[in-house]
Amino acid sequence: MKPSTDDSSGFPRTRVRSALSRRELLAFSAALVTAGCGRARATGFPGYALIGAAGEHSAVLVDLNTFQLAARLELRAAPSAVAADSDRGYILTPSNGTVHFVDCERKALTSSWRLNGDLNLLQLTPERGQIVATSPGDRELVIADAQHRKVARRVKLASVPVDLDIKPHSRSRKVYAALSGGTSGTVELVDLESGAHRKRHIDGELGCIRFRKDGEVLFVGNYNEKTLAVLDTESLATICELPLPMRPENLSFSGDQGQLFVSGSGMDGVSIVFAYDTIEVEQTVLAGYQPGAMACSTSPNYLFVASRAGSEISILNVDSRKMVALTQVGDKPSRIEITPDQQYALVLNEGSGDLAVIRIPAIGNMRSKTGAGSLPSGILTLRGVSLFAMIPIGQNPTDLAVFSERS
């Protein structure tokens, strides 16, 4: 199905700027939060955000109850990926192939494990305490038991992976790791228990790779062709190829996993893909300036879209396909995470080195005007509070994971 652009969606075609400067907006937002704006004060989330700060050779813990920096954890190398399970955080420093372990309650590093000579990607499996990482130098997938500091398996790969996803298959119950091989055009699939390894070639440069929720279908972004390759997981056979108006550099599922959102270079818009039944591009809607990282809340059903070269977050109502809000955050937002209670959107700003916090229930209290005063028609002016807090992190923050306090 050919993607379409909804010109009546209410999305501005040009970059939208706030009537206030970023400093003024932050100060005004903080004042309104402190005053409570005549409404009940918000409560925080009982947990922490773990964030890598590559420029500082450190990681930080942010207390999401108080929205304050709880601890800075010094490392000996620049961190890249971070991950978290129910009570433990994991930090990868790729240059020395080391995984560092964080105890959230103690707010401290508990130990470090040099897993390999070098590593570039890290994810957790559904089984607690098991991590999967990739070694570009050795072209290996490393499957390890973090609790017992034991490598369970090493699987040789055909190419250096640029992205990794892990998901159990709903019918076979096998847990698979899928990897995309960048300019090599290789898609690889590894059964994490048996080590069985399959691969196939797709013409083009491959980037983001994601499993559907049931693990039965793989979506792979093809940058050169501006397509989304849809593959059957177990056979890696092509189900279909979906043409897109942009390079599929970012893939994000809706809260119910029924829709896949795609953004990237080439268009100031987001393509919406139906992921089940008839897999197709349902439509493409305009979504702010140079859309990049995305995340979706479930209650309400909002899509948060970061401007990869600016300082804005566009907020789309998934049901109506309309943009309901725009808010200024820090410079070059690169990662968005929704807290498990669906109350806050956490935005990691790579350029300004801080974490912006958007309180999701406040979005419904926003109003917009067009053509107000001397503003040109179509410029969006927001009323109400969206930016709840701004927390300094450090130079070049790289990744973000959220985990809850123990009950």
Image: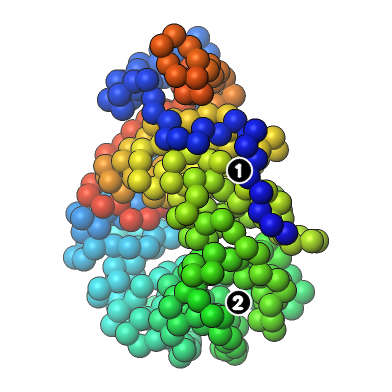
Label 2, label 1: how many angstroms apart (C-alpha)?
A: 33 Å
Q: Tell me, for residue 176, which label it has, or none.
A: 2
Q: Name the residue under label 1.
A: 285
Residue type indicated by callout 1: Val
Q: Classify residue 340 by image quadrant.
A: top right
Q: Nearer the viewer, residue 292 or 385?
A: 292
Residue at 71 percent across and 65 percent down: it is 214
Query: Residue drawn 35% across and 41% down?
Result: 310
In this rendering, would 112 be left or right of 338? left
| SS at circle 2 | strand
Mark 2 or mark 1: which is in front?
A: 1
Front-most of residues 142 and 256: 256
| Of the pair 116 and 130, the residue shown nearer to us | 116
Location of the N terminus by quadrant is bottom right
Question: In x, y percent, where is residue 181?
Answer: 46, 78
Q: Examine the rendered structure and indicate whether residue 374 appears above or below residue 4.
A: above
Sequence-wise first label, 2 or 1 = 2
- Between 317 and 155, the one lying in front of the other is 317
The residue at the point 74 percent across, 78 percent down is 172
Please state the horizontal and vertical placement of residue 85, each as a whole percent of the image.
49, 59
Q: What residue type is labelled 2?
A: Tyr
- Mark carried by residue 7: none
* Residue 400 located left or right of residue 286: left
Residue 208: x %, y % from top left: 51, 66
Question: Is residue 6 shown to the viewer in this render?
Answer: yes
Q: How many labels does the image show?
A: 2
